[in-house]
Image (cartoon, rainbow, N blue to C red):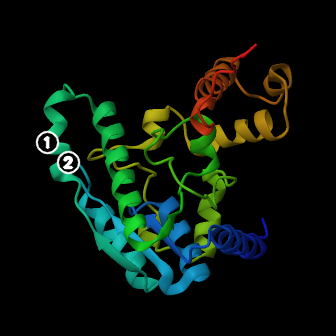
Amino acid sequence: MKNWKKIKQDLIIFLKDEVEKTGLKKVTVGLSGGLDSAVVAILCKEAFGLNLNCVLMPSQFSSQSSIEHAIEVCEKFDIRYEIVSIEPLISAFIKNMDNDKLRIGNFSARMRMSILYDISSREKSLVVGTSNKSEILLGYGTIFGDTACAINPIGEIYKSDEFEFAEFLDVPKSILSKAPSADLWEGQSDEEELGHSYKEMDDLLKLMIDENKSEEELISLGFEEEFINKIDFRVKTNAFKGKLPTIAKIKWS
């Protein structure tokens, strides 16, 4: 079992140090009612106390349970929060998206991030990210949407490990027990979209990325070649999402 007590302490120090470097004192977190944002909100509450503001941003596609779970976290840990519906923003543009769930989901994520950054400007605060390592490696996030942030305390924690950390942090059981979902539409499931459980993908990613195992080694460890190639392709094709835009080099002479 990992030393979650020390990891928690290290992440709180990280949060305090990084915010202090900016000269700011407050942080803003988008709270979805899911595991990732609950973990980040709890860490930020301990690090910043009353200087944390959480924002719930439901749309017409959000499940009622997600809103309830987000409020449950805020009430349990005495976190200040506000609710800003993005329904009017989506309604104003949805006719242009051909009923494409992916486009609507990406648009929703970018509207939420726009609101978060506007509120952070109002609050003179820093936006704290909520993407875990599995999502980052697999590219399972919206560039300039839910992946946008100033700092991220959980970007080195795999999703399958995060459940254990969340339990240590006393995240409500209503969140711990539900299937991971970006809540982009009613009934949406991360693992159904990705085609595998986080446990299956994380077991492979830890060996492929962290231990740099070759395809031959991975096959010898029991992973199917098709699965290896599928995950490897996702990692490589989505790597750009985790980088700053590439700027062309110009030879001036």
Residue 45 location, x and y as percent? 53, 79
Instruction: Check disc 2 and give the amino acid type.
Output: Leu
Q: Classify 10 Å Cα crowding around label 2: few (below 14), some (14-19), many (20 and above).
A: some
Image mark for residue 112 = none
Q: Is residue 212 above or below residue 52?
A: above
C-alpha separation, residue under disc 2 versus residue under disc 1: 5 Å
Residue 1 in view:
no
Question: Toward the viewer: 227 or 142?
Answer: 142
Image location (x, y in percent) of residue 204: 71, 36
x, y percentage for residue 58? 26, 58
Residue at position x 72%, y 16% in the image: 252
Q: Which residue is mark 1?
A: 92
The answer to whether 87 is drawn above or below residue 16 in the figure is above
Which of the pair 35/97 is nearer the observer? 97
Q: Secondary structure at mark 2?
A: helix
Q: Secondary structure at mark 1?
A: helix
- Tell me which amino acid carries mark 1: Ala
Q: Quadrant of residue 196?
A: top right
Residue behind mark 2:
89
Residue furthest to the front = 253
Residue depicted at 36% across the width and 67% down the height: 55
Q: Disc 2 vs disc 1: Cβ atoms closer than 8 Å?
A: yes
Q: Nearer the viewer, residue 150 or 32?
A: 150
Q: Residues within 10 Å of mark 1 (few under 14, many from 20)?
A: few
Q: Left or right of 90: which side holds 168?
A: right
Q: Inspect this view and state whether residue 11 appears.
A: yes
Q: What residue is rendered at 67% in x and 75% in y?
A: 16
